[in-house]
Amino acid sequence: MVTTLNCAKILASFTFVFMVCSATAQPEHFNWVLDGDILIDFSTGVPDVKEEPLEFSTIEAAASISDSLGNLLFYTNGVEVYNRLGEVISEMEIPIGDTSFYKSYSQGVLILPEYGQENKYRIVGIGRYAIVDMSMNGGLGGMANVPNWQPFDSDVPGWSERNVAVRHGNGRDWWIIQMRASFNLATESWDSSFVLYLNNNNGVYVEEIFQLDLRAATSASTFRQMAISPTGSSIAIVFPTSISIYQFDRCGGLIGSEIIYVDSLSNLHSCEFSPSGRYLYFNSSSAFYIGDNILYQLDLEADQFGKFALNKIYIRSNYGTFANGQLQMGPDHKIYMTVGCKILNCDIFSALNMNLSVINYPDLPGLSCDFDTLGLYLGGRRTMLALPNTVNYALGPLEGSECDTLDGGSTAIPEASTLPQWQITPTVSAGWYSFNGPDHAILIVYDVWGRTVWQGSATGQRIDLSTLPTGLYLVHAQWEQKQATFRIVKQ
């Protein structure tokens, strides 16, 4: 059952400006390192599985980071930290038998730039962190603290594998959101809470602990996932038999009302928003329980009785020793999914785990999203369930809000009305448009799904879109530090 609450319109009001923002490449994500010694390079816009293996072993916990030019810096599974050469520069001091336990945390680690320190990065685990200093060891990086892993300055009860981060509305700091569940002996039930950490110039500290009245049963739900929408305005949470979406205020760090609730499902595991935020993809997995492996698409803008409100994109009942793994949007704005082996130290090689499944057009409805179970061949190697736990580094400040206090301008794309000297006329045409602005401005035209359909210079001030299908388009113009967006209609 899909329940859409009254405030769902807030989530549905994504504008085309946000679609342009989400289409911006993030070089920090250009290199993915997967279990099975697999390195995928997205720097050319097309994923390139490197022939040379890069040592890495994990089950579900994974994170990697590249510099502003897209060069790999380091990666981690929450136990070992590896430099770009695949050398271990840190290993958490835990009993040998517990390493698989830590590596199986679904969102066990993520990586954030350290505030005000260009060469330092913070690895965020569940209730703990480590600092990597890239100026050490001749630029290969080293650990800044001894011991390498430090606990957060708090004692928050409970345990979970849900761990996400989103940029603060000021465009500088970070919110880290973790969900904890602990068993209450007095009530013989599970208590759940959101722990909200603020990462700023003072380090990381607990800003708030939210006790939410969750409708979903939280027993045995600690190993599911969460996802933040591309705009940072909502957060999706997967439970065993249901999924909830809440409003999130990244200025004040407040988790607001539940706006979408889907129940009567089973064995849910992972989730990810589409680039525009209109669709939420989530899957069921037989990794922990017997059942079908299903990929769902939820349309967050459709009426609850609409045709595309909830779709089963893919279903398979006979995976055997394999199961659906994690979902993650790539730098190319496709959504990737692992299908991994359900047993530890798996030495089975199959088409299922030797490829990544790919949603090629995640902003198209239903089967037109083009889900391919053999979308990306991994070069003869196989992987487990993990994909890198990434964050949206390109998300800018909330312009005009009370927390928009940064100097030096904004990374957000302004509306065209803020630059009245730039114009595109007419706004409705059979194909020819005139651009009134700088001669050397770069123009990019996007369709309603955020795909680039035309790109060129404004030289000559004339734009020919006569070969494009009829419909609504967005034109993004940029020249030096100025930029603007325009909505046009092709007849």
Image: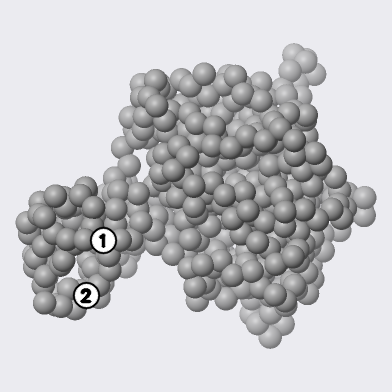
* Residue shown at 66% from the left, 25% from the top: 266
Residue 457 is marked as 2
Q: Nearer the viewer, residue 221 or 188?
A: 221
User: Residue 29, position in %: x, y?
Assistant: 55, 64
Mark 1, Cα crowd under 10 Å, few <14 / some 14-19 / many 20+, is many
Q: Is residue 104 left or right of residue 133?
A: right
Q: Is residue 300 above or below residue 30?
A: above
The amino acid on which the numbered mark 2 sits, given as a three-letter code, is Ser
* Residue shown at 28% from the left, 68% from the top: 455
* Residue shown at 44% from the left, 64% from the top: 25
Q: Is residue 254 left or right of residue 83?
A: left
Which mark is first along the chain, 2 or 1?
A: 1
Residue 445 is marked as 1
Quarter of the figure with residue 282? top right
Q: Secondary structure at mark 2?
A: strand
* Residue shown at 54% from the left, 32% from the top: 312
Q: Is residue 78 above or below residue 471?
A: below
User: Residue 39, position in %: x, y?
Assistant: 67, 68
